[in-house]
Image (spheres, rainbow, N blue to C red):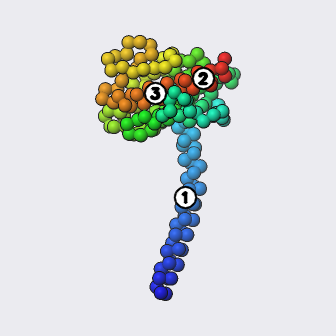
Amino acid sequence: MKEIIKNTVILTVITLISGVLLGFVHQVTESPIQEQQRLREEKACEAVFEEAESFDTSYEMPDDGVVSDFPADVIDKVIPALDQDGKVLGHVLTVTSGEGYGGDIQFMMGVSNDGELTGLEILSISETAGLGMKAREPEFLDQFAGKKAESLTYTKSGAAADNEIDAISGATITTKAMTNGVNAGLAYFHERLKEEGE
């Protein structure tokens, strides 16, 4: 009986010490991690909206970011893109698409006040290597920049219209997830943000 009590006390002390150490490590690393996330977000904003002088990261979304026509996609964050005088040039949206083959795909997209896509930057993706992971390549992402349409579609036979994107060969699910995510962002922009920039 004494041995059981002794072992229980030892395990309790080890658990308490481990908990305190983990709490300490969390406090020490939390701030640097948040700073790295902020820098990553800032860099992505600059990549998708090059014309902007600054970005209003304090902007608070007025809703939950759900677009009714796109139930698998969520607008996580909206950041107004500003010129040197503080005038809104457009918005950078962080979108999470739940339709990826390997799980969620999160990306940022820029949309100017006139509804033109200014760029895309993938933040996180875990698609199949050599197939869906090609979504990170400029050959795919650069197709979106300069598109000005209410919604986009993808094709396997070569984009011929202004609203078409070439699908990634062998990765139709990834292409669909990205295209639907962009369409959700465009719908959100046209329904809830367009008037802010006018």
Q: Amino acid at mark 3?
A: Asn
How far is the residue under mark 1 from the one under mark 2?
A: 44 Å
Within 10 Å of disc 3 (Cα), the crowding (few <14, some 14-19, many 20+) is many
Front label number (1 vs 3): 3
Q: Where's residue 62, x and y in %?
A: 66, 33
Please name the residue that numbered disc 1 is placed on: 25
- Asked if the residue at tag 2 contacts the one at tag 1, i.e. Cβ–Cβ closer than 8 Å, the answer is no
Among the 4 quarters of the image, the one containing residue 93: top right
Q: Residue at x 46, y 85 (%)?
A: 3
Neighbours of disc 2 within 10 Å: few (<14), some (14-19), many (20+): few
Does residue 50 appear anywhere in the picture? no
The residue shown at (31%, 34%) is 130
Q: Quadrant of the C terminus?
A: top right
Is residue 137 rendered to the left or right of residue 197? left
Distance (Cα) linking label 3 and label 2: 16 Å
> Identity of the amino acid at label 2?
Glu
Q: Between residues 50 and 148, which one lies in front from this camera angle?
A: 148
Residue lying at the far right in this picture: please name it. Answer: 85
Q: Nearer the viewer, residue 98 or 39?
A: 98
User: What residue is pinned by disc 3?
Assistant: 180
Q: Is residue 30 above or below residue 138?
A: below
Q: Check disc 2 and report the residue beneath it.
A: 191
User: Element under label 3?
Assistant: helix
Residue 31 location in percent, x, y?
A: 59, 49
Q: Foreground residue, 67 or 109? A: 67
Secondary-structure class at tag 1: helix
Q: Earlier in the sequence, mark 3 or mark 2?
A: 3
